[in-house]
Amino acid sequence: MQIFHRSTNFLSRVSIFGAFFFIGILLWLFYDLEASPYTTQQNTAREQPVQFSHAHHVGAIGIDCRYCHTSVEKAAFAGIPPTKTCMNCHSQIWAQSPYLEPVRESFRTDKSLEWTRVNDLPDFVYFDHSVHVNKGIGCETCHGRVDQMPLMYQAESLQMRWCLDCHRNPEKYLRPKDQVFTMGWTPPVEQAVLGERLKREYHIRSRVVLESCSTCHR
Amino acid sequence: MKESKVHGPKSNVAPELPVHPAGHAFTPGDGLDRRELFKFVGASLALAGATACTRQPTEKIVPYVRQPEEIVPGKPLFYATAMSVGGLATGLLVESHMGRPTKVEGNPLHPASLGGTDAFAQAAVYGLYDPDRSQTLLQLGEIRPWSAFLGEMRLVLEEERPRRGAGLRILTETVSSPTLARQLALLLAALPAARWHQWEPASRDNARNGARMAFGTPVNAIYRLTDADVILSLDADFLACGPAQSRLAREFAARRREGASGGAMNRLYVVESAMTPTGARADHRKPLKAADVEAFARSIATQLGVGAPTGTAESGGRFATDSFARAAAADLLRHRGRSAVIAGDSQPPAVHAIAHAMNGMLANAGRTVVYTDPVEANPEDQLESLRALVADMKSGAVSTVLVLGGNPVYNAPADLGFRDAFRKVARRVHLSLESDETSVECQWHVAEAHFLESWSDARAFDGTASIVQPLIAPLYGGRSAHEVLAALSDQPELSAYETVRQTWSGRLPGNFEESWRRALHDGLIAGSAFPLRALTGAALPASEPVVSSGLEITFRVDPTIHDGRFANNGWLQELPKPVTSVTWDNVAAISPATAARLGVANEDVVELSVSGRRVRAPVWIVSGHPDESIGVTLGYGRTAAGRLGSGAGFDSYAIRTSDALWRSGAVGVRKTDDRWRVAVTQEHHSMEGRHLARAVTSDELSRNPGVVQEMGEAPAAGQTLYPPHPSHDYAWGMAIDLGSCVGCNACVVACTAENNVPIVGKDQVLRGREMQWLRIDHYAEGDPSNPRHSFQPIPCMQCENAPCELVCPVGATVHSAEGLNDMVYNRCVGTKYCANNCPYKVRRFNFFHWSKQFRAPSMRMLANPDVTVRWRGVMEKCTYCIQRINEGKIRAELENRRVRDGDVVTACQQACPAEAIVFGDLADPQSRVSQRRRSPLSYALLAELGTRPRTTYLAKVESPNTHLDAEGRA
C-alpha cells in the first residue's frame, strides 16, 4: 500500500535542497554579522567627554600626530595626551569656551579626563605602534583620514584577517618613513614597485615570521 | 579515603607510585552524573558558536593630567630596592608598570644578589598585593586614625619620662637597618631604662655564639667559594638558605661549570641532618643525626691536627675510623688555603667554633673565609633577649610593649609562656603586615607598610648598605617601623623618608644629593661593606659532644614559607618544596628504615611529643634522611595568617622549646589511625633506569668525552616523516646546566610572577592540576638510605617535531617561524589532546576559572600587562617568555640590528642565582646557548622520541674523591 502521495517525492527533494540552502544562508549570515560594523563597531563615532575634532586640529591647523601621541615612535602605546598638553594652547585660546570646561576642570581638580577607546584590540593581541611607524606603515593606513574626522571613529575593521592582509603583503601598504605621519599621501610611483623596494630597505621580516601566531599573541 | 597501591616496575627507592582516586578529572565525588554531563556538552556546543561574535566591551583611556617626564605608557621602569629576610638584605631591581610593581629581579650590582634572587624575593609582589593584608589601624578591633595612635604614643612618653622608660619594651626582629638602629639608640638615650629586645625564630644565635667561642667576639664569617677547591658543610644548607645563598650558589656553580669544561672542579662534602638542596649537590654526602655532627666535626678537626684539648680525644675518635671523615680530612689537608668548612645555623655554637678552628688551621681564614664585624646592629643572643623580656613582663615591670614586626605569640619557644606573660602588659602594640596571632593579643594593631611601599635601609651579609626604596605609595596607609618609632620621639610626624635621609646625611661621600641619588640608582651605597678583620687563633672548644642515642627531632625553617612569615603567600605555598615536592603542608620527614621500624607509611599521622608537648603530623618518607631522626619545618599550623595560610600544615613551634630550638633527643612518636593527605607534584622519584637527568664523574668524562651522548640515542636530524620546520631569522633555544642547578625554586616563582600563572590550592594539586609552567623534577637513585640526587628544571621543550601540534584539532598550538611552539589561547577549545600527547608533561589546563583570582582589587595590580590572562577551558604552557622575546626583537628592529646575545633574558634565567639557565639564538654560533649546545655534555631529554627539543640539558659532572665509592660511603 502506498502511504505517501507521489508529490512527496518532490517535497522531499525540495527540502533536502532547501536544507543545504538554509544552512548555507545561516553560515553566510553568521559570517556577515561577524564581519559587520555592528560587531566591529567600524565607522561609529564614539561619545567622548569633549567633542575633540581631529579634523580641526590635524586638518585645519596642521598639528603633527606626535605633538599629542608622544610615544608612538618608541612604545607599544601611542599615548593619549595628558590634560596639560591641551592646556598648553587652551589656557590662551578658547580659554573661556564652555565646550572645554571638562578640560579646564580636569586641570583644576587634577582628575583625569576619561576618554572612550576608539581603536580597541582584544586583550590577547599585543600591537606595538613603534615598530609599525618605524617600518614605514603610515598612521593613515590603519586609522584612515583622521584629518577629515570631526569626531573620531574606527576606520578599519581591526579584525585578524585585516591585520593579516598587511602582514602577508606588506608591500601593498609601505610608504617612505618620512611620509608616515602624512595624511592623504599618494605613492609617487607605482605602489607595487615602491613597496618591494621599501620592504628590502626597511628589512621587513618575511611573511612566515610576520604571520606566526606569537608575533601578536602572547 | 580509600587508598590503592599499584606496584610499578621494581624500584629500589620508596615510595612507589600511588594512584589516587582523586587523580582523575571526573570522579563520583564531583557530583556530576552522565545525564548532567551530556546536558553540559550539548549546551556548550550550542553556545560555542555564539561566542565568536561578541562586540568588544567599551574601554576607557585615562591619561595623566600632568604626565611625569620619565613615564612612557607601556614601558616598564626598574627601581632598585632591597628585601630583608632575617634582617639581612638582598638587593633587587623591581619592574614597575605605570606605578605598580609587578616583578622582582635581582640587582647585578648588589653583592648578595649578583643578579639572582631566591624564591622569597620573587614572591614579594604577591605579599604586597595579598588581599588578606591588614588594611587599617585598629584599637581593640575598632578602626582608628593615625592621629589617635600618635596621641597614645604621647601618653606613653608622658608616662615613661618620669621613670626614664622603665616600663617600656620594644621587641623587633633582627635589625641591620642603620636608620632603625639610630632611632632605637636615640630612644634609649632619651629613656635609658627602656629596653630593646630582638627575637627571630630562625636567628643566627648559634653562628654568633660560635664566633664568640672561637674568637671571643661575635664576628661575621663570609665565604668566598670562588677560591674554594674543597668545601665541607657541617649541616649547612648554604646553597639554598641564608642571607648570602644567591651569591654562594653563583660562586659554587661557576666552579662546577669551570670544572666541567676542563678546569679545576670544586668538591663538596656534606654531612647533614636532613635532606637539603645542598646535600643533593654534594659529591659525597653523609646523613648524620644533628647530635652527631659535633662529634664528626671534632674527629675531622683532630685529623687535621687542630690542637685537641685533652680529654676529648676519645669522643673525637667516634668517627676516627670513618672513611668519609678520613677522606674529607685528607682532602682538606691537600687543599690548604683553598678549602672551606661551613657550619649550619642550626648546629650548636661548638660546631661553628670547630669550623672556625679548622679554617684557621687550614689557612683558609683570610682567603676562602673572611671575617668582618657583625652586620646586625646589636648582635645579642636573641633567645636570652626574649627570655629577659618574658621575665620582665611576668614580673609586671612592663607597662608598654611595642612589637615592631615579627610574630612572637606564634613563634616564641613553647616553654617560655610568652603569651601569658604578654597578656600581663597593660599596653600592647603590634606593627605587622597581617593581623596575625600576635595582633589579636594586642590592643593596638598598626598595619605595616610592605617593604615595596616604604623607605628604609638595610645591610647585606657583608655589611653593604642599601636604601630600601618604595615602588608605590602604601596601598592601605600602612606605616613602617621608622614612623612608629618617630611617634615616640620629639618629631612624631617625621616621615620615614626624612628619617632615612637624616641617617645618611653626612655619611655619604661627596655632595649628599648626588651620592643619595647614586645610592638609590645603584641599589647600594658604594664602599659600605664592612672592612675585613684579620683573625687567627680560633680556639677549639672543649665541650663534650652529646652522644646521640635513640630518636631525635630536628627543626628547620621551611624552604618555601620560611619561619611562617610567608604562610599567606599563595605562590610560596603552592611552590613544591625542594626534594619532597610537597605543597601546602609541612611533613615529618623520616628515613625509609626508620619508617619501617616505626611501621608508618607516607601520610600516616603520628603524634610527636617533646617534653609533654604534642603535635600531630603526617609522615613523609625521604630517601637520604638520617635514620632515627624526624625532620620538621617551621612556619605552618598558623591560626591567623589569612585565608591561605591559616590551617595549612601543623604547628611545630608547639613542640619547640628554648633548650631545644633546633634539635631535641627527647622526642616520642606514636602512630595514630589518622591519615593526612599530602599534595605533592611529583610522586615518583626514580628514573627507572632511563637517563633523564644525566650525571657523570669528571674521571668518567676525561676517560670518555662521549659518555653523556652514549647514555641515550638521538635520531639523526632527517629521520622523521614530518616536514622540516626551517627557522627564519632566529632559532630560539635554551640550555640548562644540571651541574649548576641547586634546586632552589627561584625560577619557578619567577615564571609564575612573569606569566600570570594562577594558584589552584591543595585540593586541586592533589588532583594533579597545578599550573606552574616550570617545574623542578627531583630524582633519587641508588641506596634509599643515601641515594644520589638530581634536580632537573623542566620548562616546555619547544620541540621542533612537537607531538602536541599534530593532535590539536583546531590549530591552537602551532609552530612559529622562529621555532617556538606557540600556544594560541583564543583558538583553544580545551580538548587536552596536546597535554596527553606531550611526553614531557609540561602543558597545564585551566580546569576552572582560576584567573578570577586576579579580579580582587589589589590582585588586579599584580598581573603582568604584557601577558594574556588565561581563562577557563584553555591550555597553557611555557612560552620561553615570548613577551620578552618580542620586546627584544622590537627594540632591535627599531635600532635596525639583530637581537644580540643576552638581549632577551627569560624570567627563569634572570632569577637563577646559579646561572644554570641560558637562553638565546641557536642560529648565532657565538651565542652562549649555541656554545653550551656544542658541549660534549649536552643532551636532549627523551631524544629517542625524535621530538628534537629546543631546550637541552648539560649533564651534571661530579668530582667524587677516588678514595670513596660513588655513593659517598667506603
Image (cartoon, coloured by chain):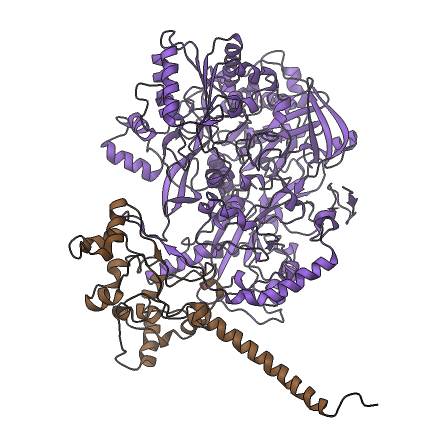
Residue at the left extreme, as displayed: A92
Q: In the displayed structure, would residue B807 be above or below residue B115?
A: below
Q: Nearer the viewer, residue A154 or B434?
A: A154
Q: Which chain is purple?
A: B
Dividing the image into 4 quarters, which one contains the C terminus of chain B? top right
In percent of width and height, residue B613 lies at: 67, 20
Q: Nearer the viewer, residue B874 or B889?
A: B874
Q: In the displayed structure, would residue A27 be above or below residue B525?
A: below
Residue B756 relative to residue B483: left or right: right
Q: In the displayed structure, would residue B182 be above or below residue B586?
A: above
Residue at the bottom extreme, as displayed: A6
Residue B464 seen from this side: no
Q: Residue at horizontal 66%, vertical 23%?
A: B319
The shade of chain A is brown
In percent of width and height, residue B834 lies at: 62, 61
- Asked where in the image residue B884 lies, by quadrant, the reply is bottom left
Residue at the right extreme, as displayed: A1
Q: Residue at horizontal 36%, vertical 12%?
A: B158
In percent of width and height, residue B934 lies at: 52, 57
Residue B849 relative to residue B101: left or right: right
Residue A66 relative to residue B909: left or right: left
In percent of width and height, residue A17 lies at: 63, 86
Residue A130 seen from this side: yes
Q: Nearer the viewer, residue A114 or B554?
A: A114
